[in-house]
Amino acid sequence: MKALLDTCVIYPTVMREMLLEVAKAGGFQPLWSARILEEWQRAAIKLGPDGVAQAAGELVMLKRDWPRSEVTWPASLEARLWLPDPADVHVLAAAIAGHADAIVTVNAKDFPRGVLAEEGLSRADPDAFLVGLYAAQPDMVAGAAERVLARANAFSGQIWEMRRLLKKARLPRMGKALTR
């Protein structure tokens, strides 16, 4: 399965790491565009100079680890598309060009299911997306979550509990599923 990751699921660190760790384990093929990655880098400005530097380093590693995930498309594709927010048309174009099965986003209102269905796409909330992958392959997703938790504990200087970490990362159902 191929899933296009919208900027809003790449920007939050733990959410991005959960999605990419599951992808590394074979759960799905992530896709994005140069513009989505640029939006992520611009959003990192809110975190100050350290956040910008960290995001730049993470971008380099992302491109190294996923060299075939960045998609491009002709301008004619974007010109024929419509979404309620014209600023999101590039996301839909990237999903179509990458032959994605779904767009993973928290912005449901900006990606109406009917419009996506016309293009053979679905929309997935990151929490529901990960819970669905967990239902299909629990060991794979649980292992990915443990690696993310270990990194969060190492980098934050505190000890996180899985459910609390994922709830803070706006993945509450995933956290609950992992701690049952």
Image (cartoon, rainbow, N blue to C red):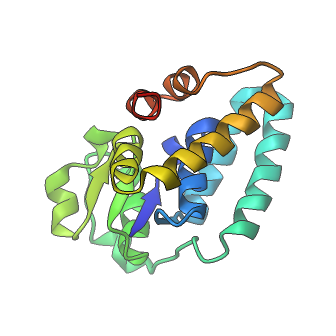
Q: Residue at x 76, y 69 (%)?
A: 64
Name above or below for residue 78 compared with residue 144.
Answer: below
Name above or below for residue 30 compared with residue 125.
Answer: below
Q: Nearer the viewer, residue 89 or 169?
A: 169
Q: Nearer the viewer, residue 7 or 134?
A: 134
Q: Position of residue 19 (x, y in %)?
A: 53, 50
Name above or below for residue 143 compared with residue 43.
Answer: below
Q: Locate the N terminus and report the quarter of the image it occupies.
A: bottom left
Q: Residue at x 53, y 63 (%)?
A: 32
Q: Locate the C terminus and report the quarter of the image it occupies.
A: top left
Name above or below for residue 116 compared with residue 16.
Answer: below
Q: Position of residue 72 (x, y in %)?
A: 52, 76
Q: Position of residue 168 (x, y in %)?
A: 54, 22
Q: Position of residue 97 (x, y in %)?
A: 41, 77
Quadrant of the rendered image containing residue 68:
bottom right
Q: Residue at x 46, y 78 (%)?
A: 73
Q: Is residue 1 visible?
A: yes
Horizontal relation, residue 88 to residue 25: left or right: left
Q: Residue at x 22, y 70 (%)?
A: 119
Q: Is residue 12 visible?
A: no
Horizontal relation, residue 83 to residue 20: left or right: left
Q: Nearer the viewer, residue 138 or 40?
A: 138
Horizontal relation, residue 45 to residue 138: left or right: right
Quadrant of the rendered image containing residue 59:
bottom right
